[in-house]
Image: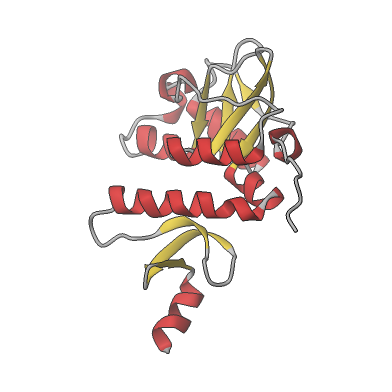
Amino acid sequence: MEMDTQVTVHDAMTSSVITVDPETSIAQAAAIMSQKGIGSLIIRSNSEPEGLITESDIITKVVSMDIQASQITVAEVMTRDLIKITPGSELNEAARTMAKNKIRRLPVVNDGVLVGILTSTDVMTVSPELTEILVETARMTNQIDYSDNEKSVPGTCEVCGNYLDYLDEVDGKYVCEECKEDIEGE
């Protein structure tokens, strides 16, 4: 018996989005992310988002390049040309958009106005069955981007169902360290 319920982006999104001005320094942005316990900020100077900056952006584009964080703005580092979604879109469409574009965050825009943000964690919390789409993306990314011995990817363990930042591939499944030990110990 299949229920025909439509879970929308609005049902899962976070509506209290932390935004900063494009001229905010990377140091200020990092401090805000740390203080608020979030992994990204939306950059905007009007109602529609202009860009997005993540912890990963700060590490790869500032810290790893030994650039002083107080001397560079978020506008110089942010991801532009954002992929956005409307609050009335179906959640499975959002998950597929994230998977297809290999992203974990979607700004939610209604009539040109930022109304929220949807993260892969939001999707998995509200609709765990869509986790398979996100895990499959991690699997595809792993095959494409990790040609050396590093095989860890973020996602949901295919054995215990816990979401972790690091999963390892064992016997064709993505599993957490604990489940990996159980499998390898058999």
Report the colour scheme: secondary structure
Residue found 49% across the figure and 28% down from its top: 26
Front one among 4 and 101: 4
Residue 40 lies in what quarter of the image?
A: top right
Front one among 36 and 97: 97
Front one among 113 and 64: 113
Q: Is residue 139 above or below residue 44?
A: below
Residue 6 lies in what quarter of the image?
A: top right
* Relative horizontal placement of residue 15, taking residue 104 as reference (left or right): right
Residue found 59% across the figure and 18% down from its top: 49
Q: How many marks?
A: 0
Q: Is residue 57 above or below residue 46?
A: below
Measured from the top left, where is residue 184 in percent x and y? Answer: 39, 83
Measured from the top left, where is residue 18 in percent x and y? Answer: 67, 29
Residue 12 lies in what quarter of the image?
A: top right
Pick the quarter of the image with the N terminus: bottom right
Residue found 36% across the figure and 32% down from its top: 61
Front one among 162 and 22: 162
Please identify the residue farthest to the front as the structure is shown. Answer: 1
Measured from the top left, where is residue 91 in percent x and y? Answer: 65, 39
Residue found 40% across the figure and 55% down from its top: 139
Q: Is residue 60 above or below residue 161?
A: above
* Relative horizontal placement of residue 140, taking residue 128 as reference (left or right): left
